[in-house]
Image (cartoon, helix red, strand yellow):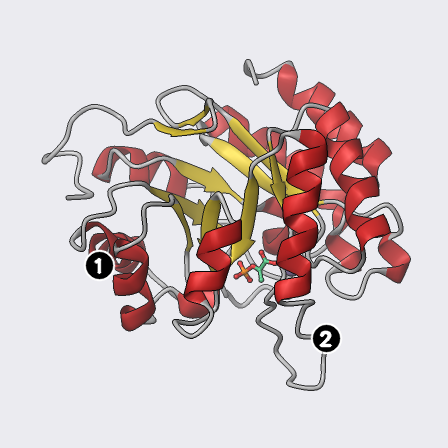
Amino acid sequence: LASRLFQPEDTVIDVDGFKIGGGHIAIMAGPCAVESEEQLMTIAHAVKKEGAQFLRGGAFKPRTSPYSFQGMQEEGLKLLKKAKEATGMPIVTEVMCQDTFDVVEEYADILQIGARNMQNFPLLKRAGKSNKPILLKRGMSATLEELLMSAEYIMSEGNLNVILCERGIRTFETYTRNTLDISAVPAIKELSHLPIIIDPSHAAGRWSMVEPLSKASIAVGADGLIIEVHHQPELAVSDGAQSLKPSKFAHLMRSIEKIAKI
Ligand code: PEP
Ligand code: MN
């Protein structure tokens, strides 16, 4: 179902009138994690002002350590809903497991399945029963074939609205958090009609590299970007080092607008 041979035309996904795929570039921006109402509202208004169409923010966070902040959970989802009401931006947020699927589905406009869950097959099947688009992130050590097979799990259950996301893969390089596989974009374009966006924040792990990688992503034909933004990155509870301040995000937007129409 995900194959270009099965469907030659690009899939275009429409969320509240904002389109993703087929030449429509989607910019999703916001904090790694929802931390408070004040934090979320500040960032939501800032990214909207600079041209982001979607607000990202984790309420359920997959953390490497069980002792790290796990997210505001349903409280966080309520804040995301509030931010949507205030800005008109549809919400992208991660769903981590089947137990919490229904509640996340109720609040989110796009459900994110994280890199660590790319091959959580029961979760993928549940996502396939949803009527919300799924943002499927590539696993840190997954091949493109495996990514497409995971999309197939969702689609074969009836949900054809899958957005793929390249977020960097594990290699021997340690300077960056992950290695951005820029070739994933043209490769997926050959293999599949599904939209593919890039997450330069988790790929780089360093804010200073987010703008150059975003420019490369747009130049190579990505259907969008998902970017972490925080007004006080040094105080962020997660992923501060890779989060852009709103002024840096504004600069990024102006430079990608020179490459393609956003
Ligand atoms: C995130 O988007 O904050 C996240 C945890 O991403 P990934 O699943 O790509 O690590
Ligand atoms: Mn993050």
Ligand 2 quadrant assignment: bottom right
The answer to whether residue 176 of the structure is visible from this angle is: no
Residue 117 image position (x, y, % from top left): 41, 68
Residue 11 visible in this rendered orientation of the protein: yes
Q: Is residue 83 left or right of residue 16?
A: right
Residue at the limit of the structure toward the bottom, as seen here: 67
Residue at x 71% of width, y 86% of height: 67
Q: CA distance from mark 1 to mark 2?
A: 30 Å
**Front residue of 101 and 232:** 101
Of residues 11 and 3, the one nearer the viewer is 11
Does residue 52 appear left or right of residue 19 in this picture?
Answer: right
User: Tag 2's secondary structure?
Assistant: loop
Circles 1, 2 touching at the beta carbon (< 8 Å): no
- Work out whether 249 lies above or below 199: above
Considering only vertical position in the picture, is 16 above or below 199?
Answer: above
Whether label 1 lies within 8 Å of ligand 1 gets the answer no
Secondary element at image label 1: helix
Q: How far across and down, in percent of the image, does residue 176 sit?
A: 65, 58
Q: State the residue at coordinates (70%, 31%).
A: 87
Q: Position of residue 191 (x, y in %)?
A: 22, 39
Residue on which the image places disc 2: 69
Query: Which three-letter amino acid code belongs to the residue tagged 1?
Result: Tyr
Q: Which mark is residue 62?
A: none
Q: Which residue is mark 1?
A: 153
User: Which residue is outermost to the left?
Assistant: 6
* Callout 1 crowding tier (Cα within 10 Å): few <14, some 14–19, many ≥20: many
Question: What residue type is disc 2 on?
Answer: Phe
